[in-house]
Amino acid sequence: MDARLQVYEDKMKKAFEYLEADYASIRAGRANPHVLDKLRVDYYGTPTPIQQVGNITVPEARIIQIAPWEKSLLKAIEKAILTSDLGINPNNDGSVIRLIFPELTEERRKDLVKEVKKKAEEGKVAIRNIRRDGNDAFKKLAKTEDVSEDEIKQLEEKLQKMTDKYVKEIDDLMETKSKEIMTV
């Protein structure tokens, strides 16, 4: 692939991967340890991901269990969960914390699907912005360097194909996530 296009391919791929990670943190009725990915715990004065201070398991379909390596972290983990937007009350039994995910109501599922669609739209906007930046860079190339108009057209066409590919991948990802959420 042309080095001038590779930069934009990498940026689009990162935008898509960011959306994938974002979707992983949206819970769909089943307990998914990725919902904890964004949570940080104060560990000796340093904000640390929960995954790095304890063992996270899913003993049942709707339960996440967090077993911290140090008992002193129980309160900090509990506080991080309570102040997050998870909307789940942690059960602390003195040695482990359990998060019990209730069944999602129909209304909550629909809200989550709306959120999924909104995030997909934001992802597509990011992809299109990358395309615009690429096209602007190609136009500058035409003015400053000895590059033919045909070459610029080819670069723009390849960039458009790349954009279409990632927009379709985002649509597919959105459909899959929406179905997962609406499946009871």
Image (tube, rainbow, N blue to C red):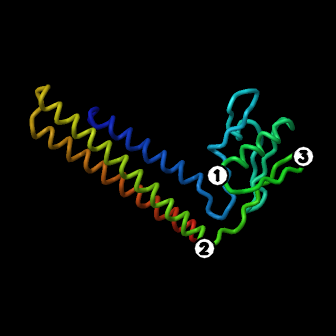
* Residue at left offset 75%, top offset 36%: 53
Is residue 42 found left or right of 181 in the rendered image? right
User: What element does badge 1 sit on?
Assistant: loop
Find numbered disc 3 in the image and state the secondary structure of the residue it sits on.
Answer: loop
Residue at 82%, 41% in the rendered image: 75
Q: How far apart are marks 3 and 2 (CA)?
A: 34 Å
Q: Which amino acid does label 3 sit on?
A: Gly
- What residue is disc 3 on? 94
Q: Residue 129, position in %: x, y?
A: 32, 44
Q: Position of residue 86 (x, y in %)?
A: 66, 54
Element under label 2?
helix
Cα separation between marks 2 and 1: 19 Å
Check residue 175 in the rendering and tell me which mark sits there, or answer none.
none
Mark 1 is surrounded, within 10 Å at the Cα level, by few (under 14), some (14 to 19) or many (20 or more) other residues, namely few
Q: What residue type is labelled 1?
A: Asp
Answer above or below: position of 18 versus 141. Answer: below
Q: Are marks 2 and 1 in contact (CB under 8 Å)?
A: no
Give the amino acid type for the residue marked by disc 2 in the picture.
Glu
- Residue topped by disc 1: 85
Q: In which quarter of the image is the N terminus?
A: top left
Q: In which quarter of the image is residue 149?
A: top left
Q: Residues within 10 Å of mark 2 (few under 14, many from 20)?
A: few
Q: Are marks 3 and 2 in contact (CB under 8 Å)?
A: no
Query: In the rendered structure, which disc, 3 or 2, sits on the residue that comes first in sequence?
Result: 3
- Choose mark 2 or mark 1, whichever is in front: 1
Q: Which of marks 2 and 1 is nearer the N terminus?
A: 1
Residue at screen point 32% across, 36% down: 6
Q: Residue 13 in the image: state x and y as whole percent.
A: 41, 43
Residue on which disc 2 sits = 106
Which quadrant does the C terminus fall into?
bottom right
Residue toward you, 61 or 44: 44
